[in-house]
Amino acid sequence: MTAPRLARLALMAATALATTAAALPAAQAQPAPNRVLRVAPHADLRTLDPVVASIQITRMHGTMIYETLFAWDSKLNAQPQMVDRFETSADNLTWTFHLRDGLRFHDGQPVTSRDAVASLNRWMARDTAGSKLREYTASLDVVDDRTFVLKLKRPHGSVPFSLGSAVGQIPAIMRESDARTDPTTPVTNTIGSGPFRFNREAWRPGALVVYDRNPDYVPRNEPADGMAGGRVVKLDRVELHIMPDPATAAAALQTGEIDVWEQPAQDLIPVLQRARGIQVEQYLTNQAMLRPNHLYPPFNDPRARLAMAYLVDQADALTAGVGDQQWWTACGAYFVCGSPNGTDAGAQAYSQQNVETAQRLLAEAGYRGERIVMMTTNDIPSIGRMAEVSAAALRAGGMNIDLQFQDWGTVTTRQPKKDPPEQGGWNLFVTFASGATMQSPITNIGTNMGCDRAWVGWPCDEEAERLRNAYVEAVGDEARQKALEALHRRLTEMQPYRLLGQFSQPYARRANVTGLVPGSVMTFWNVEKN
């Protein structure tokens, strides 16, 4: 980055100092300053139900106020969380779970197995890992207030892993009355049993989200490890200050008006690294994707999706969206380069652009220049820039792209709509998901090709689902690797989404903030502000 560019960015941050106080919401009655953590998140919170929405800001919200039966540690191994102990039958078909003592919802009601069973049934109707588990489930029954039993039709090797998922739609345990809400209808109540309580009275959409410490929460005794272990709350309040303008967030961090910037803009990272009292540290590995709608032309035809893959170059998209190559890498692995499942079998053909092949495939798919609606946002700058570059590449190949910019909240509420593009629906959007989400065929939200059970875009391919089942049921490393490669080759033929590569996302904090535990989303238990 050039010196003039750095100077200009520093000047932007300095100029924003004068307006930062106005950008922050008016102060409310609060605990002592060192007991309040102020965070600038990557996006505004619009959807409160983590079983309906898989977006990261809703998952962050969900992990604050809800808990799950198991939780992933830093190595993505499942550890008991709400579960005290469990037993498995010799044939691996019967799983008996016992809830731990001290679990209470924020309204004072005890958490029971009825709540757990209702919550799991709702989650299994929505989530990639959940729907896969449901395929194997024969029954899920309450035994008593603290015990329930899961019986399987055939062995599933990843039951605790699935029940501890912190990606996609998380298996949050809600009150039975809330969990009986239709799985496609967002729950608007926010009564969980987690370490924080959602402060609805202080919530100001577009400006402020507030969580207060749950004084009745009883943490586990184990040390915190990823999402697992003891969730010991050392703060009285966490405030999410919505700051879509990067210069404003950078200025607020440097002056101490916020304590953490969850996803700082990549081009401001050098400025923050030089700033006194600021620490920039690794947070997430993300996989970027261009997601097509498989319900409507042209992308209901796999040839049009292959054309998309031949047209959009990963390096171009990542350079635009992320910048310096130290933060990104081109990758042909749907299940994340560098992970245990990181094969790129079948993907080599799409590592280079091929406009001629793409145009032939489009013609074979019957595309004749019809308008293609691509929705995106500038609220998350990397997404907006990757979308612009992708749109330009698709236009160069002959696609008539209508690129529509909206706020991120509108984009995420539009995603689940199955309306035709000409009636408010969509054909394409760019997004990214954490490497923890995408590293396994069980949790990867984009490679679920189970039709109506799939994530937005609704890809549908019976053969891919057969091969995914083969991976789930494979015994031993050799059999699992063989199943993985067969699945991956099929996915490259079907292109449920165009891989745009992967990138590292750092976070920035003031030096007096300690205790942040790396996980699949940013969490605030165990955090102190000195």
Image (cartoon, rainbow, N blue to C red):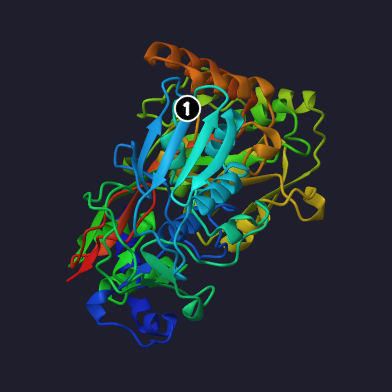
Q: Position of residue 157 (x, y in %)?
A: 44, 25
Q: Position of residue 198 (x, y in %)?
A: 45, 70
| Residue visible at 29% across and 49% down in the picture | 518
Quarter occupied by residue 102: bottom left
Q: How many marks?
A: 1
Q: Quadrant of the C terminus?
A: bottom left
Please tell me whether residue 326 is drawn above or below residue 337 in the rendered image: below
| Residue visible at 67% across and 51% down in the picture | 416
Q: Position of residue 11 (x, y in %)?
A: 33, 72
Quarter occupied by residue 527: bottom left
State left or right for residue 441 relative to residue 358: left
Q: Nearer the viewer, residue 500 or 262?
A: 262
Few, some or many residues within 10 Å of mark 1 (<14, 14–19, 20+): many
* Three-letter code, disc 1: Gly
Q: Position of residue 141 (x, y in %)?
A: 56, 41
Q: Residue furthest front?
A: 144
Whether residue 377 is visible: yes
Mark 1 secondary-structure assignment: loop
Q: Nearer the viewer, residue 302 or 419?
A: 419
Q: Nearer the viewer, residue 434 or 149?
A: 149
* Residue at the spot of label 1: 332
Please tell me whether residue 169 is drawn above or below residue 466 in the rendered image: below
Whether residue 445 is visible: no
Q: Nearer the viewer, residue 465 or 409?
A: 465
